[in-house]
Amino acid sequence: MSDSPRTEIEEKVKAFLDFNSQFSGRRTVIITSGGTTAPLERNTVRFIDNLSTGNRGASSAESFLRVERGDVSYSVIFLHRKSSALPFMRHFAVLSGSSGASFLDFDESSGVIQVVSDENLKSALRDRKRAESERRLLEISFESVEDYEIVVSSSCQAASSLGNELMFFSAAAVSDFYVPSDSMAEHKIQTSGGGMKMNLHPVPKFVGKVRKGWATEAYVASFKLETDVSLLEQKSKNSLSSNEVHVVIGNTLKDRYEKVTLFTLQGIGVIEKQGVSPIKQGVSPIEQELVSWLVDAHTKHIESS
Ligand code: PAZ
């Protein structure tokens, strides 16, 4: 029986990696996905949140799970915000949306509810079941930024024995500011005092901690989101040098599913696909091309170190 969340995560990750180690050419990617919350109270009623849906991380996980290059394949440790998009299952969100009923049929005599045949759903379900039966997908959830620190540090430390065969792919939108639990109100903050001022502390850059301590030999890809496109290049380059990651993938809020810019020490590259959305398409072309680029970069990293 585990004595802490850290031990529990480390045990899960080690058992997963142990199983996957029997397959030659099998690499592992740790993906972070979705936004973190910054709670304002220990018995949390209110929290600061952000926009991330988890679609970028989930569709990238799908692309990693589909990689078959000679004997190279990936197992995926998917660290995700609770209730954000999950690999392959995200396609089934259409069933609970406003057009959901058009995907469903009900047979009165047998009482069976059926999903109307749909190619995207069929291949998503097939690939999900395959990833599960091959034990190539491990999902671990987080909610707050403090949970995030625990799941990322424990998973990376448990997987660091993979050395350069490990990739860390940080697509999560991690809170920039938070209230540390030791200075947080215990109960729901009362409104009777009128307005209020709150002291938010900066959150450490976890991706830098992965590079410099938690998994130093891993190939590390991180994302940088901006809303002002004129800031993107400089902010991405700053992140590349201060966190010492291998690539920073820059994107802007409004066209994040159509264009990403890759910043490395060797130069800048762009992947652009007009008019696509990972939510509407079975396979998202932008994540597919991005993952293909990352697999090549990971191969070079392995060969050169
Ligand atoms: O999760 P999502 O698909 O809605 O959005 C993806 C994203 C914008 C969160 C991701 O591409 C990203 O840029 N993550 C890093 C955000 C940041 O901390 O700058």
Image (tube, rainbow, N blue to C red):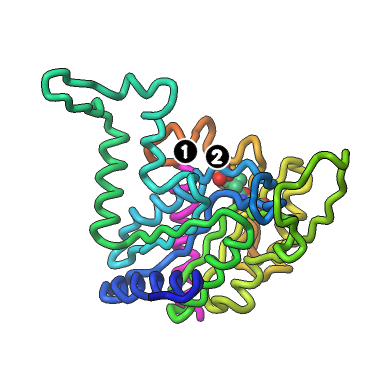
Q: Residue 98, percent across and down?
A: 44, 21
Q: Mark 2 is on which residue type?
A: Tyr
* Dot placed on the residue nearer the N-terminal end, 2 or 1: 2
Q: Tell me the SS state at disc 2.
A: loop
* Residue 257: mark: 2
Is residue 260 visible to the viewer in this orientation of the structure? no
Q: Residue 231, percent across and down?
A: 78, 48
Residue at x-position 27% and y-position 40%: 123
Mark 1, residues whose alpha carbon is within 10 Å: few (<14), some, or many (≥20)? many
- Disc 2 vs disc 1: Cβ atoms closer than 8 Å? yes
Q: Quadrant of residue 90?
A: top left
Q: Quadrant of residue 257?
A: top right
Q: Residue 258, percent across and down?
A: 56, 38
Q: Please indicate whether residue 20 sits to the left or right of residue 31 in the image.
A: left
Magenta-tinted stretch: 285-305
Residue at x-position 63% and y-position 41%: 51
Residue at x-position 49% and y-position 33%: 276
Q: Main secondary structure of the magenta part?
A: helix
Q: What residue would you read off at disc 1?
A: 278
In the rendered view of the protein, which quadrant contains the N terminus? bottom left
Q: Mark 1 is on which residue type?
A: Pro
